[in-house]
Image (cartoon, grey):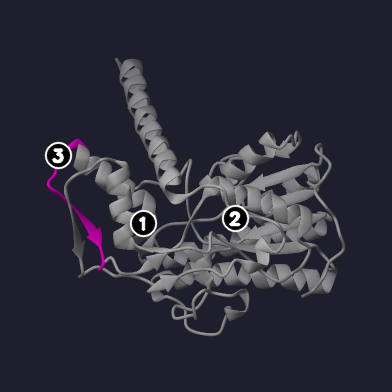
Amino acid sequence: MNKMKQTDLLNLDAKIYVAGHKGMVGSAIERTLINQGYTNIIKRTSKQLDLTDKLEVDHFFVSEKPEYVFLAAAKVGGIVANNTYPADFLFQNMNIQNNVIHASMLNKVKKLLFLGSSCIYPKFAQQPIKEEYLLTGDLEATNDAYAIAKISGIKMCQAYAKQYGMNFISAMPTNLYGQNDNYHPENSHVLPALIRKIHEAKDTRAANVTVWGTGTPKREFLYADDLAEACIHLMKVYNSSDIVNIGTGEDLTIKELATSIAEALEYEGDLIFDVSKPDGTPRKLLDVSRIKNTGWQPKTGLPEGILLAYQDYLKQINESKMAVRHEVLCVS
């Protein structure tokens, strides 16, 4: 393990840049930092700062001089989105990573945490997946563009640590869900997609809900605020360029997940599995012994997390309705 010098994030007025603060992960990191008493958080929306534009990113880092960077900005999506827009996932994510990581080096950022994804690992990796299994086999074809971009970000952080002595670390979270998740019917991940489908079926009193695939693949799910606490914990105590997994260490089948969501939403219809649709990776369970050895444990169980996510989905629906009403009133 490549040990770096100790630079704990202890000063509550340290200048911290959360890249991607409007997304599910970035907003959870920002929210958790505030709850822990940090007071000097820098943030920019994508309209204010285009992270794919090198000149804009360079100017931002020169003018703001952040001390710590959480790189949570990325183009993300589910199987359909990854399959449909592979060029976008590869191009945009590599540009974001290249620009932010390089600018962080040039401006002597004390520490950077890069967020990858569990999809970086081989499709048929031994379970649970240890960090050292990276690049030991073929990737899942439905999201290889996104995975390759993330692997590039990991390697870039390791290269900058080796060549320039930068304290750039990389964390690989499992499947995430929580506040500010994406519930788009085509471009969302499995858990929020199922929340939307089952809610709409309950709302319309539909007799059944169609779930993609066989229902047999197994997945691990982590609540976004638990991930945020893990990221801040790593920023404080972890100083190695070796990647570190973040997850619960437990998984369940997609059928079990869909059943749990149906029960939480009190939907009494049938679940029908469309076997003509792709399953994706058969199983994806992370070995989380490395991060647990640093003293971190997740707090939010899946039943509790599903209810919290559903409350957030209902909030998004209400806000969308309010926005439409406001637009109608303004037009009239």
Mark 2: few, some, or many residues within 10 Å (few <14, many ≥20)?
Answer: some
Mark 3: few, some, or many residues within 10 Å (few <14, many ≥20)?
Answer: few
- Say which residue appears at 58% left-offset and 49% top-offset: 226
Q: Which mark is residue 52?
A: 2
Bounds of the magenta segment:
203-214
The image position of residue 201, as x and y in percent, is: 20, 43
- Say which residue appears at 62% left-offset and 37% top-offset: 31
Mark 3–mark 1 CB contact (< 8 Å): no
Q: Nearer the viewer, residue 79 or 303?
A: 303
In 3D space, how far apart are the residues under numbered discs 3 and 2 (Cα atoms)? 44 Å
The image position of residue 234, as x and y in percent, is: 71, 56
Q: Nearer the viewer, mark 1 or mark 2?
A: 1
In 3D space, how far apart are the residues under numbered discs 3 and 1 (Cα atoms)? 22 Å
Quadrant where the image shows the C terminus:
top left
State the residue position of label 1. 190
State the residue position of label 3. 205
The image position of residue 102, as x and y in percent, is: 74, 61
Residue 185 can be seen, yes or no? no
- Say which residue appears at 68% left-offset and 40% top-offset: 33
Query: As shown in the figure, which amino acid type bears the numbered disc 3?
Result: Arg
Secondary structure found at label 2: loop
Q: Nearer the viewer, mark 3 or mark 2?
A: 3
Query: As shown in the figure, which amino acid type bears the numbered disc 2?
Result: Thr
Q: Earlier in the sequence, mark 3 or mark 1?
A: 1
Q: Nearer the viewer, residue 174 or 167?
A: 174
- Say which residue appears at 16% left-offset and 47% top-offset: 269
Mark 1: few, some, or many residues within 10 Å (few <14, many ≥20)?
Answer: many
